Each structure stands twice: as structure tokens, then as C-alpha cells.
Image (tube, helix red, strand yellow):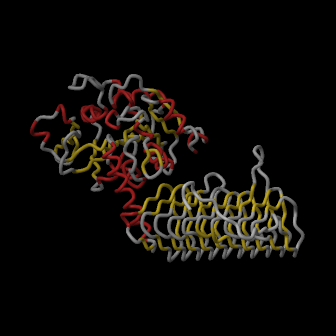
Amino acid sequence: MSGNGAALEVVIMAAGKGTRMKSSLPKVLHRLAGRAMVRHVLDTVETLQPARVVVVTGHGAEAVEAHLGGHALAAAGRLQFARQMPQLGTGHAVQQAAPLLCDEGVVLILNGDVPLIEADTLVRLVQASAGERLVVLTVVLDDPSGYGRIVREGEAVQAIVEHKDASPEQRAIREINSGILAVPARHLKGWLARLRNDNAQQEYYLPDIVALAVADGVEVLGLATDDEVQVAGVNSPQQLAALERACQRRQAEALMAQGVRLADPARLDVRGRLQCGADVEIDVNCVFEGEVSLGEGVRIGANCVIAQARIAAGAVIHPFSHIDGEKLGVEVGEGALIGPFARLRPGARLGAEVHIGNFVEVKNATLAAGAKANHLAYLGDATVGERVNYGAGSITANYDGANKHRTVIEADVHVGSNCVLVAPVTLGAGGTIGGGSTITKDTPPGALSVSRARQLSIPNWQRPVKAGKA
């Protein structure tokens, strides 16, 4: 898209080292709300349907390119990379991308460490440019120290002056350059070629194209936003943490606007996408990762961690439960009761009204409606029928040291406490497994199956005593 129907191309600058992060990880790969900062930017750009996106990499280029290589834009052939080696400023970064760009339409220039820019703001920039005007996104700050100042003559932007090169009068200006621009493609390459590095940093500054545009008679607009969070960049762990809190607060506000009841909006972390039905309640200190869906009336207790899961209407997740679906996902059926202190691992599929109690772990197992495992148990690689009651301390021994095997527990089976079910094994429908049994063979339907040593009592048994004591 672009304002005049011509193609939109995007350049994302992601070459910086981020020295103040004090990390071996490239700055743009540091995570905000569960995603790398540059991934936030690229995901937002994707909604604009650009013809091409060029990510300029430098420090840690291989890691950044590998991280983004699986993005949908790459799969569609619309994502390319340009290397900036060495890093000689923002103008120099865009110079590396220029050979990959067309000469018509709009080029949108973004920063990989400004992760919360919103699509609506970018659309406004592109439309204002229309392939004819240079448009700068600006913001007014109480403390503009360190930022390039917007120098205007009336409403028209005349130049952007970097803080280190600004006069005292210019440093008094509070309107600053966000670093986000929409540029007419037909002028961009010529302006980049004319950039000079005769400044305090001896770098090629991208904002210098503003003065070049003015000299060429191209209209320059300053499009202001009053939303500092959208244009906030990250250069230190402190700034990353502050932006994380701002991001989480926004997500909390959006959830509450949909009707979700949060016990404390300041104690919620959404590190992915959380979809909620009506009348969902979430207690404090809960973390949601990846894709999580909560059906109508779901209640999440305090201190739960939930990732890659679908939780159906009316289910209750009691406090301190850990649900992590990873690649296989987890499904919790309607009206199920989970926890407290339960663990659901990848491939857990729980039907309606299933009960998984405290210190019960379920992995790659299907439990049909009404099945219960209420205490201190393990169900791995299992198929559990309706209304099964699975006793405390019982486990499926699913691993023989080389391969995983499956346990089948048919409907209405009652498994006593402290049983070991050695897979592969099938427990017939309606059967009962006596407590303390080790089951290595299939059991018939309706039968009581017991496998344990005969009880022996020795009368007048004397317990050992320590030497020297009567």
C-alpha cells in the first residue's frame, strides 16, 4: 500500500550492537512481551502488506537473519537482508538497503529497537507522504536530551539537528525526531548519495535528508504523535524493563475493555496472544505465553503459567498450576478442574469435567469426560476413558529406556493408589486395579486385578536399638 497506490517498501534498521545492554545477544533480539523487539516491528509491518521489506543487519547479523528467516514475509519472498559493516550511522545503514529498493512509491524507514510502533500510525505516515512528501514522525518530550530536534519554520520542517550538533537554542526545542520516516522512493537514493559525515560523530545521519529535501523543494511534514510509548526505543536493560511494563499495561487495559476481570492489571504478563471469552477472571501473577485461548467463564487462579493452550468454557485452573503445550498444545475441556499445583505438558487433551488435582502431571495423554486424577500421579502417553478414577501415587511407566509406549485405560476403570502400569498395557472397561499393584499385562473388563506380594506379619517383632541403649 501507499498513499498514491504505488508500492510500499520498508527498511528496518537492525544493525546496532547495543553496548549498553551489556549482552552478547544482538540488541534487537532482546525480548519484549515474549517476542524479539525486531519481530514486533516486522509483525506490525506485515499488516501493511508491503511489496518488500529490507532488514539492515550488522552486529550479530547471522543470528538476526536466522531469527527472522522463518517469518511469513520471508516465506512469501518479500523479506531481504542487507549488511552494514562497519556501522557508520543511520544514513549509512539505509545506503546499504538502497540497491534493493525501487524508484517509485513510498519507503517507510523504521528502527528494530522501537518495538511498539502501531500500524495505524504508520498508515498515517504513508498516506501523508503519498510518494511526494517526506514525512517525519515526531513527539514532544519533557526531556528531549540526546534526541534530534525538529527545526521548523512555521509548520514546515526545515531540518533535524542531532543533540550533539545542536546550538543552545536548538537544544531548547522539545519536539524530537522519532527516527521513523516515510520517504518518496524517487528521491531517496539521490539524497542518500549526498549525505556527509562532517559532524561530531563522523557518521552519516539519515535525518540530514530533511535539509536536502528542503533544498530540493520537496515538502517536509512533521506528523506528531502524543504517544511516547509508540516511539520509545531501547538502549539499556532499564529501558527494556520500563517498556515491558508499559506494554503489559496496554495489554491489560485492552483485556479489561473486552470484559476480562483482572485482579490486578499490574500483575499480568502476556507474552504472546491471549484470547478471552465473556466473564473470564484472572488472578494475580499469571503468565500467558504463545497462543492461549480462554473460553467463557474460565477462572485462572493466582501464580499460574499457561502456554500454548486452549481452555474451554467454565474450566477452573487453580493456583500455581503450570500448563505448557509447546508444539503439541494442551486442551482443557468444559468445566474441567485443574490444580492447584498441577502440570499439563504437551499433548495433554482433557475432556469435559475432567479433574486433575494437586501434584498430578499429564503428558501426551487423552482423558475422556469425567475422568479424575486427584492426587500425586503421573499420566504419560496414555488414553484414559470416561469416568476413570486414577489413584494417588499411581504412574504410567511409559519409557523402557529406548522407546515410549502407550497405556490404554478403558471407561469406568478404578486404579488404586500407588500402582505402576507398565506400558504397553490395556486395562479393560469397568475393571479395578488393587492398590500397590504393578500391572505388566492387559487386564480383562470388569475384573479385579491385583499384583503384589502377600502380606506377612511377624508377631512380637523387636525393633533394632542403638548400641549402648537399653
Residue furthest to the right in view is 444
Task: Give percent across and percent down for residue 296.
Answer: 56, 75
On screen, residue 171 above or below 439: above
Query: Nearest the camera: 273 or 400?
Result: 400
Q: Residue at the location (77% across, 48% down)?
A: 400
Looking at this view, name the residue that lies furthest to the left: 168
Q: Nearer the viewer, residue 227 or 25?
A: 25
Quadrant for residue 328, please give it.
bottom right
Q: Is residue 47 above or below residue 203?
A: below
Task: Specify whether 149 is left or right of 406.
Answer: left
Residue 89 vs 182, above or below: the answer is: above
Dividing the image into 4 quarters, which one contains the C terminus?
Answer: bottom right
- Report x, y in % for residue 53: 49, 39
Q: Position of residue 19 (x, y in %)?
A: 33, 33
Report the number of numbered marks.
0
Residue 162 rendering spot, x and y as whole percentages: 22, 35
Q: Dividing the picture into quarters, in which one does residue 10 lie?
A: top left
